[in-house]
Image (cartoon, rainbow, N blue to C red):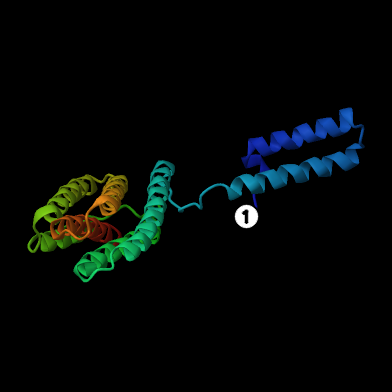
Amino acid sequence: MKLANPLNYPIAVLIGGITLVIGIRFIKLPSLVMIPLSTGIAGVGAVYLKSREPESLGLDNPQLERELQKVKERGINLAQKAQELRTEATKLLTDAMQMELLVAVQYGCDRAVELPSKIDDLARRLQGKDSLLSVSDLQEQLRDVENKLKSSSGIAKNNLNQLAKSLERNIKLARQGEDARQAQVINLSQLVQDSAGILQQLQNQMRTADLSNLEQVHQLESFSKELNSLQENVQILVDK
């Protein structure tokens, strides 16, 4: 159970105050009884309200903390949907000609399930006032992207090109002495949103496709590959 200071939760203090007034003025209980009781109610209310809050990510920048919390919430939602899709795919894809698709879907879903823990890893890297992303960190991420571009094509190449452009902008920010962390979180947010869109498309298509049709199976495989590509890009952002 999280301890909480009632003074940080005005609603809890208000409820405690109302309890005190009602007890003393209307029920006519002695103040020696009502003061500890109302204080306890305020304390319990504060604990409840704090338990409803997401765990702090420990960032020194409140706006950055809020943005990363939102990304994490979307990541948790995506992870839950990915787990559901993995289960659904295992039930649907049982024919020998569908095994390659099943493996691709399972792999992409497994990577998506890891998103919340990856976001926590990134949050730890961004903690503290001395955690401004360095040019060397960003350049290393960019080198990883450029290396992958050499062997990429199609959708994966497009995704990598977009990430490369974003990293180049972040490097300029860092060189100017500005905090590139927010741009990095924006990059991650976009990747999570794109992953959610592809996951939804994959699920919709898998439910409606003729899974005995090889052409439609290949189309589903292309969605799986794009999901995998986006998850690899997430890994680049959180690894360095």
Residue linked to disc 1: 2
Q: In percent of the image, x 12 and y 51: which residue is there?
A: 158
Quadrant (top left, top right, bottom left, bottom right) of the C terminus: bottom left
Q: State the SS at label 1.
A: loop
**Viewer-side residue, 75 vs 168:** 75
Total label count?
1
What x and y, as percent, mark residue 55? 51, 53
What x and y, as percent, mark residue 84? 39, 58
Quadrant (top left, top right, bottom left, bottom right) of the N terminus: bottom right
In the displayed structure image, the side of residue 141 where residue 22 appears, left or right: right
Amino acid type of the residue that numbered disc 1 sits on in the rendered structure: Lys
What x and y, as percent, mark residue 185? 32, 48
What x and y, as percent, mark residue 64? 38, 45
**Viewer-side residue, 72 vs 34:** 72
Question: In the rendered image of this protein, does residue 31 appear above or below residue 159?
Answer: above
Quadrant hosting residue 211? bottom left
Q: In percent of the image, x 13 and y 53: which residue is there?
A: 155
Q: In percent of the image, x 30 and y 59: which residue is there?
A: 238
Residue 115 visible? The answer is no
Most extreme residue toward the bottom is 96
Most extreme residue toward the top is 25
Residue 25 visible? The answer is yes
In the displayed structure image, the side of residue 178 where residue 155 appears, left or right: left
In the displayed structure image, the side of residue 72 where residue 138 appears, left or right: left
